[in-house]
Image (tube, grey):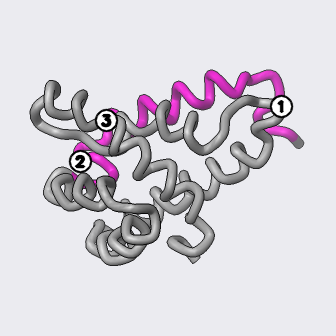
């Protein structure tokens, strides 16, 4: 049986974003924020190499949840011709809910880099989260 029959993808997305916002600690953790930001400023291959080193530093529950979300986003992005949600759009929608910075002005200024990082985590999720 389809448990989600009659429920829009927008509603499911809104619930996921709310869940991520209400976590006691952001998924990518505040203590690693400067390192994630540094990784985001690098070329893609170096960014992924840095992510490979940073991901094991996350709490296990965060790593597992992030891997599941990235895998889901990969499946959604594979249907982007129909749903218009490629990895870049998914990262833009979910990014602000997955990592937080204490200073909202700083976070706003850095949000583009963070979104690129999350886009690449989605794009490389099969290798980052085996």
Taking depth in this image into account, of 42 and 117 the one nearest to the observer is 42
What residue lies at 56% left-to-right and 64% top-to-bottom?
A: 125
Q: In the drawing, what numbered circle is on residue 82?
A: 1
Q: Earlier in the sequence, mark 3 or mark 2?
A: 2
Helix, strand or loop at mark 1: helix
Residue 109's disc number: none
Q: Nearer the viewer, mark 3 or mark 2?
A: 3
Residue 72 spot, x, y in % from top left: 64, 51
Q: Secondary structure at mark 2?
A: loop
The reply to whether the C-beta atoms of the residues labelled 1 and 2 are less than 8 Å apart is no
Q: Quadrant of residue 68?
A: bottom right
Which residue is found at the position 51% from the left and 35% from the top?
A: 16
Q: Nearer the viewer, residue 35 or 102?
A: 35
Q: Secondary structure at mark 3?
A: helix
How far across and how far down the image is residue 101, in percent? Answer: 17, 39
The residue furthest front is 43
User: Badge 3, how many Cα within 10 Å: few under 14, some, many 20+?
Assistant: some
Rendered position, 75 above or below 129: above
**Magenta span covers which residues?**
2-29
Question: Marks 3 and 1: in contact by CB < 8 Å?
Answer: no
**Considering the image in quadrants, where does the N terminus appear?**
top right
Sequence-wise, the earlier of marks 1 and 3 is: 1
Q: Which residue is at a point 49% across and 40% down the rendered structure image?
A: 91
- State the CA–CA distance, disc 3 to disc 2: 18 Å
Q: Which x, y percent locates residue 55? A: 35, 70
Q: CA distance from mark 1 to mark 2?
A: 34 Å
Q: Which residue is mark 2?
A: 25
Q: Which residue is mark 3?
A: 111
Residue 53 shown left or right of residue 25 in the figure: right
Left or right of residue 79, residue 103 in this image: left
Residue 87 inside the magenta-drawn segment: no
């Amino acid at each position: 049986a389809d448990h989600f029959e009659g429920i829009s993808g927008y509603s499911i997305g809104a619930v996921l974003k709310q869940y991520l916002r209400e976590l006691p600690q952001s998924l990518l953790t505040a203590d690693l924020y400067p390192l994630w930001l540094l990784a985001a400023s690098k070329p893609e291959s170096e960014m992924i190499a840095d992510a490979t080193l940073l991901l094991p530093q996350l709490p296990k529950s965060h790593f597992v949840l992030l891997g599941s979300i990235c895998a889901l986003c990969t499946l959604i992005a594979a249907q982007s011709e129909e749903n218009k949600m490629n990895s870049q759009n998914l990262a833009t929608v979910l990014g602000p809910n997955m990592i937080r910075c204490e200073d909202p002005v700083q976070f706003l200024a850095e949000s583009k880099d963070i979104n690129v990082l999350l886009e690449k985590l989605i794009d490389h999720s099969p290798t980052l989260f085996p």
